[in-house]
Structures are given as structure tokens and as C-alpha cells.
Image (cartoon, rainbow, N blue to C red):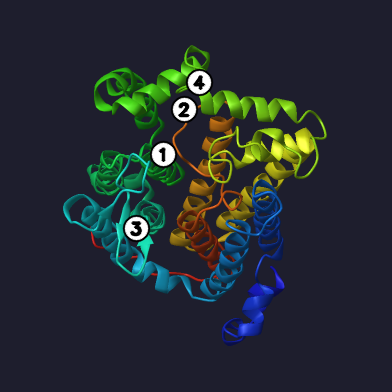
């Protein structure tokens, strides 16, 4: 039994004790990744803090404080807020579709932002958080047999399917993919029957061809076809992937040097500050730099999964694992995308790419993971739940 387990309950609630229970390895790795993101944004801008690097750094600094504050909050409050938060974010997604507040950035090709006047937000990013918490609460209140196979699984399936379809309709295929895969991952972690998983995998494979041909917009279909054969249109739809591969390969083992990447500095590489920033890392720091960055991401994922496994409450385990899952999906999808192993779907590399909504989602998620770490001995009562 650990020293923390022997601590009297009243002492565990002290702020100093909670701070000592934080996993500083996880926090340090997040700082390293965001620091590397700031350095790359500075390089991409030609050695200038504007327009990206300083904003990236300031946002991260502010969100670290928010993350640590969230870690001090007892999981019972996240448990109580799970369904209301999911409902609020779902309403925001609906507002994009059915109200004039829906906003489409120039050249984005998707109406996926909500213009509130004083600020613009991307509800699809926050849906990942709301979905994880809502599913964690649902599974906390149901038995292992019900999680394995039961008619009641229609409720978590609905919680996943409704936002997936709404976000895909915007159309924001990248965010919809992360939402759907995150939900599926949570159902798997919660104990879904292998037969159901196998049937779902077969159905997904069967539905992909007709979905690509009839369910996608023309530009989305072109992205898939370009992924299969980018050289078919090297100066058009295949341009992004080809330039990304050139940047990845030209870095060699040690890279061209900081600030010396021709693809990014000469602006051949598109979206070099967001979707394809990892290609810039590979060009300037080579295989060594790329391996280091991926090692940092793997370290974050392993530490967070360890935190999830140590939580005493089922809610804490599912929530922490779900938060880690969507972070891992970001890394996997973006990494595959820039290497030409997946279609370009606009999924950023977390904390490395420039973007406020994405960073906020990731940092909020790790605030909840750290809350699970600090309060890992907390027990939450089971009940019938909302469903």
C-alpha cells in the first residue's frame, strides 16, 4: 500500500497534498511538445514571433494554469457535469447547422465554426470532451455484462452516432472521424463483445466504398482518390501530400538545420503551421528529431494510460482512457496523413500545430486525466444514471 493510500482523508484534500500527487512527468512532456511547437512556428515565420509562435506560447501558458486548476477538482464534479456538458456542446453543433451563427472560414470548405460575436469557437473539438465524459458516466452506472452486449448499448451508440453524423454533415470529416473512433475506442475499453467488434469492423469495411462514391462531397472524394494515387495530379489535388513527402525525405538522418527547411521556408509546403507542421520538424531535424517528437507523444500516452489503470472509480478509468484515446488518435491520424498513409482530413498534431480550439481541447482533456491521478482513490457511487 502506498503512502498516499495511508494518508487520512482530510489530509488528501489539502492543496499541497494534491499538488504533490500531480504527475510532473506528464506535465513536463506536454511542455516539451508545446515548446517544440513554438520553436517550429517561430522558424516557419522566418525567425519572427508573429503571427503564430507568440500566440501559441501564450495560449499554452494560460491553458497550463487551467489544466492544473482542473486537476484539483474532485472527479465527482466532472461526473455530475458529464451529461449537461455533452448536451450543451451538442446544442452548439446543432446551432451551426440550423442558425445563422454557423460560420465558414474562407477557403475552409466546411461550416464548422460558431460565431458568437465576441469569439469564434469550433464545437466539434469540445464534443470530444463531452462525449468522453458522457460515455464514462453511462458505463460507470452499468454492469460489465451490459457493457459487453445489451439492448441498452443503443444509448452510448446514439451518443456517438448523433454528433458524428452532424459533424460529418458540416462537412468536417476529420473531426467526425475522431469523434466516431473515440467513441468506438471507449466502447472497446468498457468491454464490448469481440463478436460485435468483428461485425462492426466488417460492416465498416463494406460501407466505405459506397460512402466514398455517394456519401462524400466532391472535394472529399478527391482527397481519398489522391491518397491512393497522389502522382495522378501532382500540381493539383496531389500537391499537399507530395510536398509533405519531399519535406519528410529531404531531412535525412539529422535534418537540414533549424530554420533551414526549404519546403517550409520557401512556402512549398501547404498549411505548414497546422496540418503539416510535423513535416517541417522532419525536414529541419531529420529522423532524429522526428523520433524524439514521437517518443514524447508515446511517453504522454503511456503515462496517461497508467493513470487510467490506477483509478479506483470506473468513471475515472473510462474518462482518463477516453481522453488519452482521442489524443492518441490525433497523433496517429496526423502522422499517417503527412506520410501519405491516410487521406488529408485536417487533423492537427496536438500541441505542435497552431490552433486554439485544438490546444484547448487537449489541455482540458489532460486536466481531467490529472484530476484522475490526484484523486485516484476516490470512489463514486453507482446508480441507475440518466439512462
* Number of residues whose C-alpha sits closer than 10 Å to that of mark 3, classed few (under 14), some (14–19) or many (20 or more): many
* Of callouts 2 and 4, the N-terminal one: 4
Relative to 63, does residue 202 appear above or below in the rendering?
above
Question: SS of the residue at dot 1?
Answer: helix
Real-space Cα distance between discs 2 and 4? 17 Å
Instruction: Name the residue tied to disc 2.
Output: 343
* Number of residues whose C-alpha sits closer than 10 Å to that of mark 1, classed few (under 14), some (14–19) or many (20 or more): many
The percent position of residue 287, horizontal first and vertical second, equals: 76, 33
Instruction: Name the residue tied to disc 3.
Output: 134
Q: In this orientation, which residue lies closer to the viewer: 368 or 345?
A: 345
Q: Residue at x 41, y 25 (%)?
A: 223
Q: Horizontally, is 95 left or right of 287 in the view? A: left
Question: SS of the residue at dot 2?
Answer: loop
Instruction: Name the residue tied to disc 1.
Output: 174
Q: Are marks 4 and 3 in contact (CB under 8 Å)?
A: no
Q: Residue at x 39, y 38 (%)?
A: 177
The percent position of residue 80, horizontal first and vertical second, equals: 35, 70
Determine which of the numbered discs, if any, sits on residue 235 in the image.
4
Q: Are marks 2 and 3 in contact (CB under 8 Å)?
A: no
When asked about the image quadrant of residue 274, the answer is top right
* Of callouts 4 and 3, the N-terminal one: 3
Amino acid at each position: 500500500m502506498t503512502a498516499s493510500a495511508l494518508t487520512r482523508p482530510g489530509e488528501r484534500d489539502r492543496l499541497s497534498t494534491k499538488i504533490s500527487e500531480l504527475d510532473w512527468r506528464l506535465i513536463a512532456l506536454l511542455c516539451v511538445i508545446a515548446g517544440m511547437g513554438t520553436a517550429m512556428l517561430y522558424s516557419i515565420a522566418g525567425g519572427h514571433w508573429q503571427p503564430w509562435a507568440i500566440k501559441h506560447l501564450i495560449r499554452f501558458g494560460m491553458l497550463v494554469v487551467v489544466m492544473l486548476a482542473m486537476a484539483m477538482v474532485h472527479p465527482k464534479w466532472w461526473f455530475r457535469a458529464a451529461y449537461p456538458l455533452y448536451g450543451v456542446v451538442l446544442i452548439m453543433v446543432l446551432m451551426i447547422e440550423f442558425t445563422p451563427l454557423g460560420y465558414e472560414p474562407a477557403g475552409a470548405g466546411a461550416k464548422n465554426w460558431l460565431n458568437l460575436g465576441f469569439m469564434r469557437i469550433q464545437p466539434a473539438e469540445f464534443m470530444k470532451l463531452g462525449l468522453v465524459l458522457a460515455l464514462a458516466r453511462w458505463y460507470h452506472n452499468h454492469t460489465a455484462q451490459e457493457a459487453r452486449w445489451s439492448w441498452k448499448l443503443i444509448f452510448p451508440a446514439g451518443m456517438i452516432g448523433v454528433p458524428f453524423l452532424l459533424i460529418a454533415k458540416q462537412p468536417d470529416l476529420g473531426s467526425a472521424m475522431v469523434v466516431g473512433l473515440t467513441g468506438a475506442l471507449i466502447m472497446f475499453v468498457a468491454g464490448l463483445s469481440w463478436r460485435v467488434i468483428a461485425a462492426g469492423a466488417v460492416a465498416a469495411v463494406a460501407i466505405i466504398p459506397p460512402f466514398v462514391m455517394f456519401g462524400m462531397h466532391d472535394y472529399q472524394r478527391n482527397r481519398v482518390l489522391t491518397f491512393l494515387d497522389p502522382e495522378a495530379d501532382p500540381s493539383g489535388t496531389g500537391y499537399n501530400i507530395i510536398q509533405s513527402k519531399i519535406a519528410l525525405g529531404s531531412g535525412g538522418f539529422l535534418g537540414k538545420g533549424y530554420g533551414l527547411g526549404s519546403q517550409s521556408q520557401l512556402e512549398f509546403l501547404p498549411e505548414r503551421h497546422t496540418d503539416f507542421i510535423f513535416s517541417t520538424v522532419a525536414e529541419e531535424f531529420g529522423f532524429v528529431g522526428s523520433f524524439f517528437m514521437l517518443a514524447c507523444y508515446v511517453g504522454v500516452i503511456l503515462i496517461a494510460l497508467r493513470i487510467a489503470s490506477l483509478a479506483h472509480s470506473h468513471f475515472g478509468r473510462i474518462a482518463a482512457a477516453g481522453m488519452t484515446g482521442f489524443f492518441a488518435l490525433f497523433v496517429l491520424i496526423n502522422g499517417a496523413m503527412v506520410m501519405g498513409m491516410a487521406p488529408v482530413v485536417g487533423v492537427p498534431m496536438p500541441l505542435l500545430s497552431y490552433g486554439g480550439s485544438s490546444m484547448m481541447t487537449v489541455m482540458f482533456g489532460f486536466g481531467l486525466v490529472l484530476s484522475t491521478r490526484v484523486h485516484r482513490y476516490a470512489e463514486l457511487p453507482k446508480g441507475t444514471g440518466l439512462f
